[in-house]
């Protein structure tokens, strides 16, 4: 893995970055240098290479903040060279020198895709897919739940995205989403870490019990809302009709109006408070999304309208909003529900979003191939889609293909610990429908990644698999998992290009 040294020797004779990129590209197997990462700044050559210590940032020449990076310094061809770990500290310095490696707001962009890289290894594959497409990638996208399950931090997530962008020389901009944040502390933390998008999960402030209350109980709870607020809301909505384009009208009658207010009022007040006191005052542009999808019942168009109207009246600038659509958006599998009902109700939600000037957001969007054509056409190519777990599953597919012994152990562990994983995720997987892996040939194992039940089991047990340790404290699967994925890095990138590329094709994007 010392090929990068030969590359540095060549760089002594060649000072043009484009020529060095071509040299690295034409001789990757010899130099182990990622060609698009080659940059020259103030006489110093920067690039990412495979070294004896793993993938590293190499700085050849000490004229540009050489000492600011952590790493091992050597002498090569009469110059200083530093081999730097691709860690959090060095990513911060990288973002200062190369601004294109820092996330930016995507406000004003039509198609945005949250790509949720839980492993910190998928983003180069995502970039290779979207590089020439009309898609803004939100590469750094993680929820607190995902951080806890993977043992990562927002520093880790953003660092991985920055290194991927540098490796691939991607200069069109990417986002960083603090996904499904629930508390003021979480929102502040994500903003402080440099994240450019906040998805506020209001599920803990939505009263799902209202739908089962009697009329008298609704009246009693409604009377508990301060009279000033009640009268203001009634004056704005009760008995009124709102025309939301193309013959679509929303009207609030008294029973529906009161239930809607009771379900969402606390969530609305909470969101306005978080936005005005934290997000609006942070000193930079933040893409703000409100999530009301983590509920037991579908969001009615009337509820969506009232929520959006009140947020905007409260000073909230909405970039996107995620309703709870009809049917089920379960993890890792296609949409479950009535397609025509989805088409009708989704069209109404889109009209509301267009009326107020923001994008509709589709959560748990991984593998929802049957509804993607509807999403792409009804929105006329203006939406936000979130994926995450499907990237993990494509990594598991590589393990099944290249390290079947490890896959067998992971699969068995996932089944044995499914009950624990179900505490965090709702799935409908029936383990009785999963084939006995002991009766399968190694060549058949990847087929399990094409079966809904086994996909879901492997999907939601990712955190348990990655965090499991033996009695000595050593990881049971993690190290071998990452070593295998690193060895077959390009195969993983290609798997992501195909799989996420299928998502984009179904959405109507011309993917080569």
Image (cartoon, grey):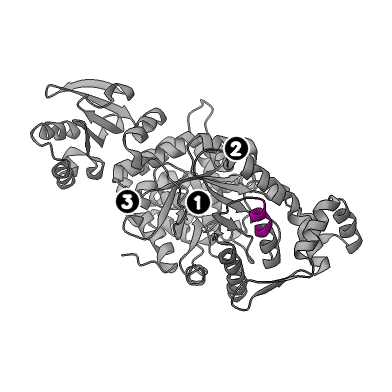
Residue 136 in the image: x percent, y percent?
41, 54
Q: Which mark is residue 389?
A: 1
Q: State which quarter of the image contains the N terminus.
A: top left
Residue 244 in the image: x percent, y percent?
63, 71
The residue that appears at 43% across and 55% down in the rendered structure is 445
Residue 79 in the image: x percent, y percent?
15, 23
Mark 2 highlights which residue?
186
Residue 87 in the image: x percent, y percent?
39, 31
* Residue 311 falls inside the magenta stretch: yes
Query: Where is 274 relative to 268, above or below?
Result: above
Q: State which quarter of the image contains the C terminus.
A: bottom left
User: Which span of residues is magenta-colored?
Assistant: 308-315
Residue at the outermost bottom position:
247
Principal secondary structure, stretch drawn in magenta = helix
Q: Which callout, 3 or 2, points at the residue further toward the start of the chain?
A: 2
The residue that appears at 39% across and 43% down in the rendered structure is 121
Q: Element at badge 3? A: helix
């Amino acid at each position: 893995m010392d090929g990068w040294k030969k590359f540095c020797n060549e760089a002594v004779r060649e000072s043009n970055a484009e020529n060095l990129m071509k040299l690295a590209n034409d001789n990757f197997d010899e130099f182990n240098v990622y060609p698009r990462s080659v940059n020259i700044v103030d006489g110093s050559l920067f690039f990412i290479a495979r070294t004896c210590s793993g993938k590293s940032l190499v700085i050849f020449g000490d004229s540009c903040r050489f000492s600011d990076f952590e790493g091992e310094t050597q002498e090569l061809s009469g110059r200083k060279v530093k081999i730097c770990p691709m860690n959090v500290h060095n990513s911060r310095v990288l973002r200062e020198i190369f601004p294109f490696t820092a996330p930016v707001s995507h406000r004003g962009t039509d198609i945005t895709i949250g790509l949720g890289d839980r492993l910190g290894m998928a983003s180069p594959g995502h970039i290779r897919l979207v590089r020439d497409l009309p898609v803004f990638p939100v590469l750094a996208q993680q929820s607190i739940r995902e951080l806890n399950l993977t043992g990562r931090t927002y520093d880790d997530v953003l660092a991985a995205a920055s290194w991927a962008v540098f490796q691939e020389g991607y200069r069109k901009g990417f986002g960083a989403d603090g996904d499904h944040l629930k508390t003021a502390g979480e929102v502040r933390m994500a903003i402080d870490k440099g994240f450019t998008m906040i998805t506020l999960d209001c599920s803990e402030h939505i009263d799902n019990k209202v739908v089962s209350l009697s009329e008298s109980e609704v009246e009693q709870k409604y009377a508990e809302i301060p009279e000033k607020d009640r009268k203001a809301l009634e004056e704005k909505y009760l008995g009124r009709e709102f025309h939301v384009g193309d013959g679509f009208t929303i009207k609030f009658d008294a029973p529906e109006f009161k239930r809607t207010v009771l379900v969402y009022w606390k969530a609305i007040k909470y969101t306005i408070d978080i936005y005005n006191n934290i997000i609006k005052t942070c000193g930079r542009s933040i893409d703000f999304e409100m999530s009301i999808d983590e509920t037991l019942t579908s969001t009615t168009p009337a509820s969506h309208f009232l929520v959006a109207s009140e947020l905007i009246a409260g000073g909230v600038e909405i970039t996107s909003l995620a309703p709870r659509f009809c049917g089920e958006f379960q993890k890792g599998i296609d949409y479950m529900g009535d397609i025509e009902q989805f088409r009708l109700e989704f069209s109404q939600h889109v009209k509301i979003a267009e009326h107020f000037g923001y994008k509709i957001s589709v959560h748990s969007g991984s593998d929802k191939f049957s509804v993607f054509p509807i999403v792409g056409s009804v929105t006329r190519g203006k939406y936000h889609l979130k994926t995450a777990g499907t990237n993990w599953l494509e990594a598991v597919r590589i393990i099944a293909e290249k390290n079947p012994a490890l896959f067998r152990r992971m699969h068995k562990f996932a089944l044995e610990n499914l009950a624990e994983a179900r505490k965090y995720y709702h799935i409908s997987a029936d383990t009785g429908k999963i084939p006995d892996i002991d009766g399968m040939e190694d060549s058949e194992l990847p087929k399990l990644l094409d079966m809904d039940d086994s996909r879901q089991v492997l999907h939601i047990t990712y955190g348990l698999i990655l965090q499991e340790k033996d009695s000595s404290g050593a990881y049971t699967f993690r190290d071998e998992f990452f070593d295998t994925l690193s060895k077959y890095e390009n195969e993983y990138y290609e798997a992501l290009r195909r799989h996420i590329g299928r998502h984009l094709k179904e959405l109507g994007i011309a993917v080569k």
